[in-house]
Image: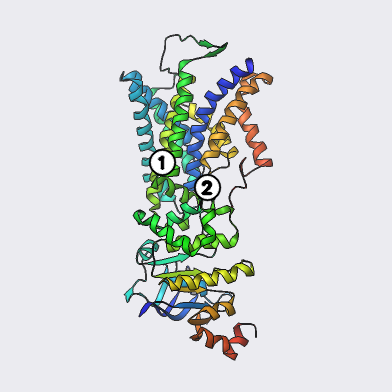
Amino acid sequence: MELLQLLLYGCVLGSIVALGAVGVSLTFGILGFANFAHGDLMALGAYVAFLVYVQLALPFWVAVPLAMAVTALVAIAFDRVLFRRFRTRAPVILLISSFGVALILRSAIQLIWGPETLLYVTDLQIAERWLGLRYHERQLWIVGGTVLLVVLLHLFLAHTRPGQAMRAMADNPTLARLCGIDTERVVLWTWVLGGGLAAFAGIGLAMDTRLQPDMGWFILLAVFAAAILGGIGKPYGAIVGGYVIGIVMEFSTVVLPANYKPVVPFAIMVAMLLFRPTGLFAGRST
Amino acid sequence: MTLLRLEELVGGYGEADILHGVSLQVAVDEIVVIVGPNGAGKSTAMKAVFGLVRIRGGRLLLHGEDIAGLGTVDIVKRGVGFVPQTENVFPTLTVDENLAMGSFLRPERVARQRERVLELFTPLREKRRLPAGTLSGGQRQMVAMGRALMLEPSLLLLDEPTAGLSPRYVGQIFEIVRDVRASGVAVLMVEQNAKQALAAADRGYVLATGRNRFTGKGSELLADRDVAQAFLGG
């Protein structure tokens, strides 16, 4: 029973990590660099939702899509003023500048919303019970929303023109250009998806725990571990990687003290880089 | 009628020139082959057509229009298809999707044109839903050529289409090149399999150190003793 309970919690955490990892994987696949600002984009999404839902007192179903849109726009803005300039440079330049973006975002969040911990809902929430499992309604929303977004993402990538162009560019950017694909437009779509999904993941994280300016920074390691586990650059792999990381993190509390939980993705990442650096699903393509 | 004409083309990558005055032409309904030793500038001449080489002298004419300095997409739009030597498919996309990418600029024509391409490359028919990365080298080459034919080009550029293929596939590729020409598309190809390529060609150019060395009908070059001794291994 206890293990089932942990599996449920693992799926909640896994949903959050998976959505974050998809964004990291897409950005890596299309733009070729590891975006260290991705965790802070997640945090930004969570705080924008706080602004709309708590400070402006609008309904939550307004806050979520609005936060996703704002985060996507911020990501695009950083691309236009910063990342685009370094597009033809070495990936390490982009990686370092993404560090800078991460710091800018985190400081901006602290400046606007302050350093203290915030909550979407302050009244005490009592867990519901079902077949002996404890759960909160919000956790079902996180998992359900993630499943919906993953299905939508799949439909987008598999069946729409921009989605196919995105996969083509991740596969072979030179050939994509030979086909007449507008690569800058693909980059735009990448930030729309990456930013939007990051915002939803950040909101989920804030619902499941609380809002803190450095929340994105602390989840980033798990997100990167999931992206690497799934074979970086492969969005579907990143989703599986996210759930594996989330579930293993929760299960680790059976044998390790709970405050060691953040170390688990790090250990998985090191093990992966040592033994299977191309990810769990390597070998499908050349 | 001349489709493509290079006149005394000089150019290269960065500062160094690789082409020191290369001239060649491709007419409608022709298969033209460029052969020559390594470093002769064969692939560079082809890439120059695609705006991938810095051109510093001479002229580059397509349908009589000077296309030097145009970007890759503009040249694709003017009816030239290009199949690079390596990394010429999208490995995780299915065969169908690879072909659809070839017609990305004209999505309304994908279905009809894909049917025509599959007529040409019948072995691909049963692999349509497989990722291109899982196919054999020869089939991958077919996907690459099929992709380039999706936009109904008037000229197809092939950079060593038989490199690394087993002899069985080499013959098949040359057969397909003839079929492509029969369907009304001119072909300009760079080849290492010089003898087979010249046998298939209407016209051949032998390049060496970035200059024209011999020019003639494919069969004439094959029969030419000087060419044979210098470039075809006797």
Q: Is residue B15 visible?
A: no
For the residues labelled 2 and 1, the Cα–Cα distance comes to 19 Å
Left or right of residue B109: residue B45: right
Residue A191, label in figure: 1
Tag nearer the camera, 2 or 1: 1
To which residue does mark 2 refer?
A92
Say which label, 2 or 1, has the lower sequence index.
Answer: 2
Looking at the picture, does residue A173 appear above or below residue B138?
A: above
Image quadrant in which the N terminus of chain B is located: bottom left
The chain under label 1 reads: A
Q: Is residue B31 visible?
A: yes
Residue at coordinates 55% horizontally, 42% vertically from top-left? A232
x, y percentage for residue B24? 44, 80
x, y percentage for residue B43? 51, 71
Residue at coordinates 53% horizontally, 35% vertically from top-left? A239
Looking at the picture, does residue B89 appear above or below residue B18?
A: above
Three-letter code, disc 2 = Val
Secondary structure under the numbered disc 1 in the rendered image: helix
Q: Nearer the viewer, residue B176 or B217?
A: B176
Three-letter code, disc 1 = Trp
